């Protein structure tokens, strides 16, 4: 064999070997998510940790803005172009995707043993037979405040409704800060940061939620109307032009130090830590009267599922099994302070603000958002209608009573409580 032929043969072998290697390294998994804020955390911490242990699998995080996610994901499922890993909304939205055959059952995934039934409840069928998303995190509602502003104005952390409004009055009278940063343009903000944040205090958390599902209480009853009466009072403290204020506008007003209080989900912590140049604290939703039991929305927020039509199911399952691991829980909860792990292995929180939120689990009764389980399965959708009416009440275009009646009438039009 001439040296020329040998060279060609070696080159061909080398090219084939390289091609074979490239092919082996070419399994790319795409993650669908609404968490646009988390792009850097996935790219810099989570994905590298997984890829280091799983050569040959590449992972790409491809988020869609939160307000567009559900519709866009539905369209991609229909078109057969959805990613391999689907970030799961809690309860009915994901259950619907499972029933449609878009999400695969993960009941037999080994890592599922790391979660309690309560942790899995948001992604399990009504009969409990199938789990279809790995629980990733819950979020807790409350209020984040500017400590510098509170110190400057001599405001103590409010624990009752009266103290809360007294604090807002003091901030407003001083004029340095907008008392509270929240807008109504994006609708969901008014419902999630407003109604679902303070509501459990009035309807007594899980007790009221269960009564609503059973038909023993209606949205027109006092415990469900009262939070709207409180929200109506918020209007005077939200600053000029709040009706045109988007969710990112609210975030900016607070982190730039222009607003003193931010009605929050704990998911804000990571972003706020990077942007706010002042010390922050947090307090749970105020109780009506001193000594009342306190309630928090500690809501199963996010899971990860498998696209039933993924071209790489085995690699995707390997990734999901890692998502179910204590290693993922530790990286995730500490990289994203405010997304509290649902893993049975406890995660020590390094962030003081996140630790403050999670400490409320010790003293307040937890519940989930009232509209998420069962009650938003029909049309009109109670969750989406609650967005609209929460904004309407704060804007002053509906009274609390009118809003409650619209919501109950909508629910009555399709929902019949099981007897």
Image: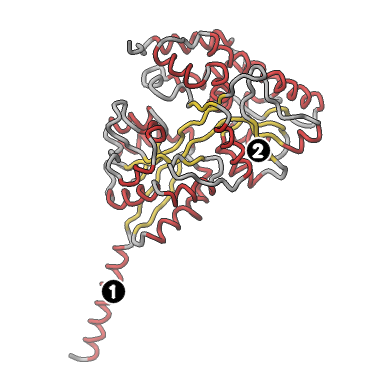
**Where's residue 311, x and y in %?**
27, 49
Q: Judge from the rendering whether residue 23 lies leftward or rightward of residue 369; answer left or right.
A: left
Quarter of the figure with residue 154: top right
Q: Which residue is mark 2?
A: 252
- Check the picture and name the quadrant holding the N terminus: bottom left
Q: Tell which of 187 and 137 is nearer to you.
A: 137
Name which of mark 1 and mark 2 comes first in the sequence.
Answer: 1
**Where's residue 28, x and y in %?**
35, 54
Q: Is residue 144 above or below residue 26?
A: above
Q: Tell which of 190 and 359 is nearer to you.
A: 359
* Mark number displayed over residue 282: none
**Where's residue 6, x and y in %?**
23, 86
- Check the picture and name the quadrant holding the C terminus: top left
Q: Is residue 323 above or below residue 209?
A: below
Q: Is residue 216 visible?
A: yes
Which residue is at a point 45% across and 39% down the rendered structure image? 342
Quarter of the figure with residue 56: bottom left
Which residue is at a point 43% across and 18% down the rendered structure image? 210
Q: Is residue 285 above or below residue 332?
A: above
- Give the structural element (helix, strand or loop) at label 1: helix
Q: CA distance from mark 1 to mark 2?
A: 53 Å
Q: In the image as oriented, which residue stretches furthest toward the bottom?
A: 2
Q: For the residues carrying marks 1 and 2, which lies nearer the camera in this image?
A: 2
Q: Residues within 10 Å of mark 1 (few under 14, many from 20)?
A: few
**Where's residue 141, x and y in %?**
56, 30
Q: Which residue is mark 1?
A: 15
């Amino acid at each position: 064999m001439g040296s020329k032929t040998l060279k060609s043969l070696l080159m061909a072998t080398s090219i084939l070997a390289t091609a074979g290697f490239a092919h082996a390294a070419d399994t790319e998994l795409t993650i669908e998510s609404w968490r646009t804020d988390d792009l850097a955390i996935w790219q810099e911490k989570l994905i590298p940790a997984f890829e280091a242990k799983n050569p040959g699998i590449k992972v790409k995080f491809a988020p869609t803005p939160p307000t567009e996610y559900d519709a866009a994901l539905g369209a991609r499922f229909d078109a057969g172009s959805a990613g391999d890993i689907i970030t799961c909304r809690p309860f009915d939205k994901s259950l619907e995707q499972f029933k449609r055959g878009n999400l695969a059952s993960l009941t037999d995934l080994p890592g599922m043993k790391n979660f309690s039934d309560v942790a899995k409840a948001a992604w399990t069928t009504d009969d409990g037979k199938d789990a279809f998303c790995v629980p990733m995190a819950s979020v807790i509602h409350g209020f984040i405040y500017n400590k510098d502003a509170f110190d400057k104005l001599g405001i103590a952390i409010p624990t009752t409704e009266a103290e809360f409004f007294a604090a807002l009055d003091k901030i407003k009278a001083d004029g340095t800060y907008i008392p509270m940063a929240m807008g109504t343009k994006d609708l969901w903000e008014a419902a999630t940061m407003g109604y679902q944040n303070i509501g459990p205090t009035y309807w007594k958390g899980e007790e009221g939620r269960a009564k609503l599902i059973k038909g023993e209480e209606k949205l027109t009853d006092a415990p469900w109307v009262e939070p709207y009466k409180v929200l109506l009072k918020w209007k005077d403290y939200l600053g000029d032009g709040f009706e045109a204020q988007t969710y990112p506008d609210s975030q900016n007003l607070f982190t730039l130090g222009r607003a003193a209080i931010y009605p929050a989900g704990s998911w804000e912590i990571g972003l706020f830590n990077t942007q706010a140049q002042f010390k922050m604290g947090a307090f749970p939703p105020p109780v009506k009267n001193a000594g009342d039991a306190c309630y928090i929305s500690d809501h199963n927020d996010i899971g990860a599922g498998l696209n039933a039509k993924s071209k790489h199911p085995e690699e995707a399952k390997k990734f999901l099994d890692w998502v179910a691991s204590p290693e993922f829980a530790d990286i995730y909860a500490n990289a994203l302070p405010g997304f509290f792990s649902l893993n049975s292995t406890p995660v020590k929180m390094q962030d003081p603000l996140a630790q403050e939120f999670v400490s409320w689990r010790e003293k307040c009764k937890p519940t989930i958002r009232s509209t998420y389980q069962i009650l938003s399965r029909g049309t009109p959708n109670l969750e989406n209608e609650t967005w609209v009416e929460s904004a309407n009440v704060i804007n002053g275009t509906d009274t609390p009573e009118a809003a409650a009646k619209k919501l109950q009438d909508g629910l009555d039009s399709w929902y019949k409580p099981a007897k």
